[in-house]
Amino acid sequence: MTRTPFAPDRFWFGGDYNPEQWPREVWAQDVELMQRAGVNTATIGVFSWALLEPEEGRYDLGWLDDVVELLHAGGIGVVLATPTASPPPWFTAAHPDALPVLADGTRLWHGSRDTYCVCAPAYREASRSIARVLAERYGDHPALRAWHVHNEYGTYCWCDHVAAAFRVWLEDRYGTLDALNAAWWTTFWSQHYESWEQVVPPRATQYLHNPTQSVDFRRFFSDEMLDAYREQRAEIRAAGSSAPITTNFMLPTWNHLEQWSWSAELDVPSVDHYLDTTGPDGEAHVAYGSDLTRSWADGGPWLLMEQSMSSISTGGRITFKDPARAVRNSLGYVARGAQSSLFFQWRASAGGSEAWHGAMVPHAGADSATFRAVCELGSVLDSIAEVTRPPADGRLTSSEIAVWWHAEGWWALENRSLPSDHLTYPDAVRSVHRAAWHAGLEVDFTRPGADLSDYRVLLVPSMFALDDAAVRSLEEFVAGGGHVVVWPFSGIADENLHVVTGGYPGRLRDLVGLRVEHLAPLAADESVVLDDGSTGTVWSELVQPDDATVLRRYRGGDLDGSPAVTRAARGTGTVTYVSTHLDLTATRALLEDVAAAAGVAPVVADRPASVEVVRRRGAEHDYLFVLNHGERAACVTGPGVDLVAGGRTDDGVTVAAGGYLVLREDEDATWDVTTTG
Ligand code: GLA
């Protein structure tokens, strides 16, 4: 697919705007406040289907025309959504077969959002129609910045429409029933299929599901939702609209889409990101979401479609987000490639299911610390507009460390028939990324099997199943002098989730230079100690080195004295194997050690722990973002220009506690970052 160019010359600032919830006099106030805050982008129509098409085939676009014209007259661009995440009541009444069905057979009712089955023909047809109508009406409107197709694809269904589509997908993947039976290992538990009609989605069943069937269902559903996206995209293009098209992924908890194949079909990947903790780890979480999305964007710019200005979701409770943090975190996304700072939502709803979600204009109104922070952010984004211009090679960082990421890795570890429920893919990946973040090392994520020539270090956290292409690329990377770190339960199985026998990790045994004979996963409250005093949780195993050297041993317990961390020399490269979930300090030290051996340095050496420093590459200059997450002021000294306050930084500038700096760097600048006070 040829991507429509995406090259805004300023940061998109604004968010989801739902004027239909308010009387028209509020609309005029909204535009006035948006202008005051420097908002330049409003995402409209995300959940407007019932008002845009009040009955089948009867459209009422007059109010949306007025909104678009009002925004346009106010100098505010529009990201126009197709509203297909929430079909209207008439649709449900006419097509009850298009309501989603849970794995246990319960058919859901209308009354929330996302009450549709993506495989239902009536839903697909209705989605194409509303996309076509909107594209014909607004496709060449000068206010249109981009299309936002749907919202957070990810609604599963287990109905008969889904079963039929699943069979078609399986026939395409396997060709024959024999191949399917072999891949699904159906000789076990009398699951052998004699006809395609016998195959069903992994619906609620008596005991454990077939793991390959479950992962295939996730693969299928991602592909099916991608088809639905493509259909809407085709309608938009057929109507002649040339604006960039995207759909918003959801992080961190959703894993319904295989983001690499999806991103290849988007003009620009976009993501909704909500912090999962109020604590300092939330700062590392900003980096995680950003590094992932930039990687899905091939290292280039991406859109932060939603975040929250003033709240953090913490297990059934909303916690107020400090306005200074909201600004700092927004710059954290930008530092790592975001081309926007967009929020859910502009004005806090007074009713409905999300009235208590944070907003740019809170219930208190514009006379609030939150809105003042919105204005500050708008002004900062304006001051740093030059940062948006990408370098000629399109790569916004110079990371030489890659982390393997794949949705299938996550899906594979969700099976409940594995040796431990405590080993989760998000935790495995997050712990590695978090350690790199603390070490100040830049990382990208990359797809197993993809070209690794930009990298010197590859990190492989718990990637259970590997196909031939992935194994080959790993071998070639190491043969070329690359340094690899492998965490437990990686390379155990092939792409059908079949264990490669003869000792774990069967697919990587020669590369890691060892053989694991038996696994010893730990209980939730158990830990192991290594001979350097570091601790491991979640996992342990009996490692028998072949030609790998032992770096650390287990101390005490059943594995006393046996190897815990090993390293195999491979030409000029190395392969380090970590057999447990090491604590943060030990993981960080390990990464620093491997990075140093590979000649990879952090962005700034010896910076205070609470000060994050990120470099974003630009067209003519590089830019340094300094984010002070700590409670003490910091001082930054080096050759550059402070883009926000103005003036040179050679003699040092202060970053207040909780504050930030954005600097245009002189060529080959080096920086000194310390805390003061
Ligand atoms: C998601 C949705 C929004 C809103 C926010 C906040 O990201 O896209 O519509 O529901 O979450 O909960």
Image (cartoon, rainbow, N blue to C red):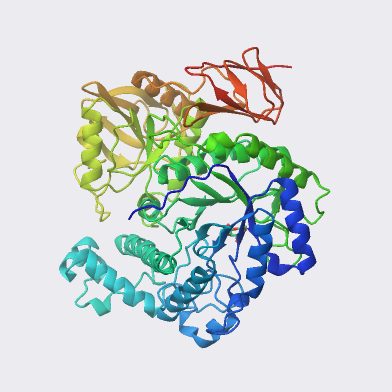
Front in this rendered view, residue 534 or 673: 673
Q: Residue furthest top?
A: 651
Left or right of 371? Residue 53 is: left
Is 506 drawn above or below residue 200 in the view shown?
A: above
Q: Residue at x 66, y 53 (%)?
A: 75
Front in this rendered view, residue 261 or 590: 261
Where on the image, by quarter, is ligand 1? Answer: bottom right
Is 58 drawn above or below residue 349 in the view shown?
A: below
Left or right of 375? Residue 306 is: left
Q: Position of residue 204 (x, y in %)?
A: 42, 72
Front in this rendered view, residue 107 or 382: 382
Q: Quadrant of residue 180?
A: bottom left
Q: Position of residue 518 (x, y in %)?
A: 29, 41
Is 612 drawn above or below residue 94 in the view shown?
A: above
Is 348 drawn above or below residue 644 in the view shown?
A: below
Q: Residue at x 37, y 25 (%)?
A: 553
Left or right of 54? Residue 117 is: left
Q: Residue furthest bottom?
A: 94
Q: Quadrant of residue 411?
A: bottom left
Left or right of 491? Residue 11 is: right
Q: Position of residue 113 (x, y in %)?
A: 58, 70
Q: Position of residue 598 (x, y in %)?
A: 34, 21
Residue 234: in sight, yes or no?
yes
Residue 322: in sight, yes or no?
no
Quarter of the image where the C terminus is located = top right
Q: Residue at x 46, y 83 (%)?
A: 97
Front in this rendered view, residue 355 or 271: 271
Quarter of the image where the N terminus is located = bottom left
